Structure formats: C-alpha cells, structure tokens
C-alpha cells in the first residue's frame, strides 16, 4: 500500500518525487500505521521496487492478505496520475470507515462517486460480492479493473474468461456492458465488450484498446460502443462447438449428451435456432447450446402451447436439477438469467419460429426435428443465419 498515517495521524502518501534519502530520514523520525486496522506498518524502500508500506508478519488486517505486486502498484499509480492529468481530483487509497474498505482510488466524475479497485490477484467470489455490495449500499459505484496481463485473447473476436473474471462485467451509465482492464506495461486500457458466452470458458467478444495518452475519462467510466456483432462469426463458432460435441462426446461427462442422444438427436444436427446469442446470457454459466436445447426439449419442441411462465419454470427446474448453472454478476444490478430466457423467446418470436396463439400462449411454427443428413442441416443453417439481422438478435438491448 502507498498510504499510511503517522503517529500523529498525519496522512502520508509515497506517491510523488520523493528521493530515497528523504524517505529514509522520514522513516527514522516517524512510526506509521495502517488507516484500516491501525496496526503498525513498515515503510519499505529499495532500488528494485516502488517504495511502499507493508504490514508486519502475522498481521490480521484484511489488507495484509493481498500482497501488492510491482505490477499492481505501478498500475495503480498510473491510473491515479492519469485521472489527475484529466483534471479530476482522485484520492489514492482512501479509507471508508463506515464500510471498513479501502479501494485503490476514489474519484468523483459527472455527479457520481466511484471506487476503483485495480485487481491483479484472485480473491474469493464471496469477498468480491461483499465489497461490491458495501460500495453500492454506501452510494458509491465500484469499478473493478482487471489486470491487463490476465486477458486471454484466443481469437479476433473470442476470449477465454474464468468465473472470477466474469465478476468484473459492469453496466455503465449508458447501459453498456464491459469488462475494463488496464496494463501498466503497455500503459493501455483494454475494454472487453459485447461478451456473449459460447462455452463455459470461451466467449464471443470485441476489444477496444487505448493508451492512457489517448483515453478520455469516458473510456473508463462510460465508454461508447457500437453494435458490431457479426452473425457469420457467431455461426461459425456455434458450428465448431456442435461438431466438437459430436466428435468428442466422451469428453463431456454430463447428462446433456446422454439426454439428446436418448431423444435421437445428434449434436452436429441440432437445429440452427439452438445456440443463439442473447444479451443476458452471461448470467448463465451453462453454454447456450445446452440451455437452449433443454428449453426446446422441455417446452418449445412440444406440440402443446406454452407461456412465458412455463418457459421460466422449465428453466428453473433444470437449474434445480443441476442441469443448468447460473452465474452471479454483482456489478450488473438490473439483470438476471430469467431475462436471458425471455430474450431467447423474443428472438424466436421475431424469427417466426414461435408465434402467439392468444391468451398469452405461444406455439412452435418451425420444425426442430433432426434433418435427414448433415448437408441438409448445413444448408438450413446458412439460410437461417442469412435471414438474421443484428437488430433482431440485439433488439432487447
């Protein structure tokens, strides 16, 4: 940490052009304490690392359990300096006694109080949620910034995300969803946006990259995104997954493949209306091919009419039976997995695969049965995706 208090309660920050001899002299004259736990801390000065304060061995302060790396400290400093240069008034490592938390930086921007948490190490989901909820309850908007080194880009429009990294997904004031990240080595922001899960780990995504020399505050606080989902890219990724399931079924030790095979449905021949992108799908950990197949088997594919409530009930029943897993995204307070189900239903209605029959009931109009051979499904897939527009798939945004 870079901020501590002296024995007289004077706040001291190691940020700035302090010379090592000056810091050494100051250290000899004063004792330093953690603003959070009030325990004594040590000012560490060396030639290899940025000067910083550290808790003594055996400390029980929560701050002492997260050892800050050079990468973390330098990133925090660069973010602070960038905000200062943009004319804002950030505070480095402020302490909020009412919630017993200390973010890396606090700053007021366009009428909103923000707490910036630059997170380079993994913490528990429970702790992440606890800190996030405490900020919101105190009227502070938290922005968790992922370390740029942890971004695992695996294609032009593809990323590998862990469950922990999904926690960073936030909703901006303009209602855009983004995982913000920053790399002090390249001095660059990386906004990962339009995240649409493909599998448990892999997702369709786009990247916006700007150095701190060219990024305005909006790039962090309220970035603007254009809708550039490329349906052909999504189609190709979904086709790869369907083929993989068919060729590597032994790798999937779950009941999903067993169930679709028991219904005489081959993974590679699943109809194109299974595996569609919907905005709230990040709330569902289970891949879209799987959870949408369940909805087809349980509700949509049956001959009798059904309601929105029936769809949701079927989904929840699958969750209860552990066939579908949902994901917590604490920074998005207005979304849920139920909205993803509704959006999927809306897409099917817009594509005339499902139509309203009256009295709030719906019925399938297009066949979702298994085609006779692969060439048939591939042609149907081409025709299906050719007729899809971004406005239909993202119309619920």
Image: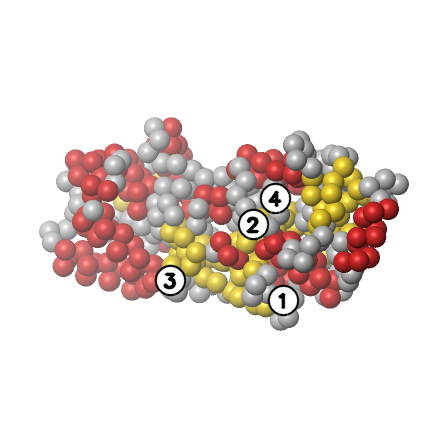
Gap between marks 3 and 2 measured at Cα:
23 Å
Q: Are marks 3 and 2 in contact (CB under 8 Å)?
A: no
Mark 2 and mark 4 lie on one chain; the one further toward the N terminus is: 4
Camera-nearest label, 1 or 2: 2
* Residue at 66% across, 35% down: 57
| Residue where numbered disc 2 is placed | 120
Mark 1 and mark 2 lie on one chain; the one further toward the N terminus is: 2
Camera-nearest label, 2 or 4: 4
Foreground residue among 95 and 317: 95
Say which mark, if any, is on residue 212.
1
Judged left or right of residue 125, residue 106 is right
Gap between marks 4 and 1 measured at Cα:
25 Å
Mark 4 and mark 3 lie on one chain; the one further toward the N terminus is: 4
Foreground residue among 27 and 68: 27
| Residue where numbered disc 4 is placed | 67
Judged left or right of residue 374, residue 132 is right
| Residue where numbered disc 3 is placed | 155
Mark 1 and mark 3 lie on one chain; the one further toward the N terminus is: 3
* Residue at 26% across, 48% down: 365
Gap between marks 1 and 2 measured at Cα:
18 Å
Furthest-bottom residue in this view = 214
* Residue at 17% across, 45% down: 266
* Residue at 57% across, 63% down: 185
Disc 2 crowd rating (10 Å Cα; few below 14, some 14-19, many 20+) is many
Mark 2 falls on what kind of element? loop
Camera-nearest label, 4 or 3: 4
Q: Are marks 1 and 3 in contact (CB under 8 Å)?
A: no
**Image x and y of residue 182, in percent:** 57, 58
């Amino acid at each position: 940490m870079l901020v501590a208090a002296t024995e007289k309660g004077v706040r001291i920050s190691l940020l700035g052009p302090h010379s090592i001899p000056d810091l050494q002299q100051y250290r000899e004259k004063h004792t330093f304490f953690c603003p959070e736990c009030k325990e004594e801390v040590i000012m560490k000065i060396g030639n290899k690392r940025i000067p910083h304060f550290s808790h003594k061995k055996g400390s029980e302060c929560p701050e002492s359990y997260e050892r800050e790396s050079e990468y973390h400290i330098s990133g925090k400093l660069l973010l602070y300096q960038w905000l200062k240069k943009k004319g804002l008034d950030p505070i480095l490592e402020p302490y909020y006694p009412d919630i017993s938390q200390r973010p890396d930086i606090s700053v007021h921007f366009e009428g909103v109080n923000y707490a910036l948490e630059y997170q380079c190490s993994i913490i528990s989901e429970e702790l992440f949620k606890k800190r996030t909820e405490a900020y919101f309850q105190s009227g502070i908007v938290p922005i968790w910034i992922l370390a740029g080194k942890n971004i695992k880009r695996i294609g032009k429009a593809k990323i590998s995300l862990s469950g922990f990294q999904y926690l960073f997904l936030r909703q901006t004031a303009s209602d855009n969803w983004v995982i913000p990240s920053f790399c002090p080595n390249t001095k660059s922001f990386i906004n990962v946006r339009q995240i649409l899960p493909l599998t448990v780990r892999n997702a369709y995504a786009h990247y916006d990259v700007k150095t701190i020399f060219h990024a305005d505050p909006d790039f962090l606080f309220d970035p603007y995104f254009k809708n550039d989902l490329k349906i052909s890219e999504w189609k190709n990724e979904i086709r790869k997954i369907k083929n993989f399931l068919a060729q590597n079924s032994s790798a999937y030790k779950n009941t999903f493949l067993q169930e679709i095979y028991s219904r005489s449905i081959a993974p590679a021949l699943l109809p194109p209306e299974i595996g569609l992108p919907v905005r709230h799908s990040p709330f569902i950990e289970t891949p879209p091919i799987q959870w949408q197949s369940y909805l087809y088997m349980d509700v949509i594919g049956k001959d009798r009419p059904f309601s929105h409530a029936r769809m949701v009930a079927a989904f929840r029943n699958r969750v209860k039976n552990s066939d579908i897993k949902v994901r917590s995204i604490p920074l998005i307070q207005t979304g849920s997995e139920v909205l993803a189900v509704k959006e999927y239903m809306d897409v099917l209605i817009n594509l005339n695969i499902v139509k309203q029959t009256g009295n709030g009931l719906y019925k399938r109009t297009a066949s979702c049965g298994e085609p006779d051979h692969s060439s048939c499904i591939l042609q149907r897939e081409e025709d299906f995706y050719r007729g899809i527009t971004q406005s239909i798939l993202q119309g619920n945004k």
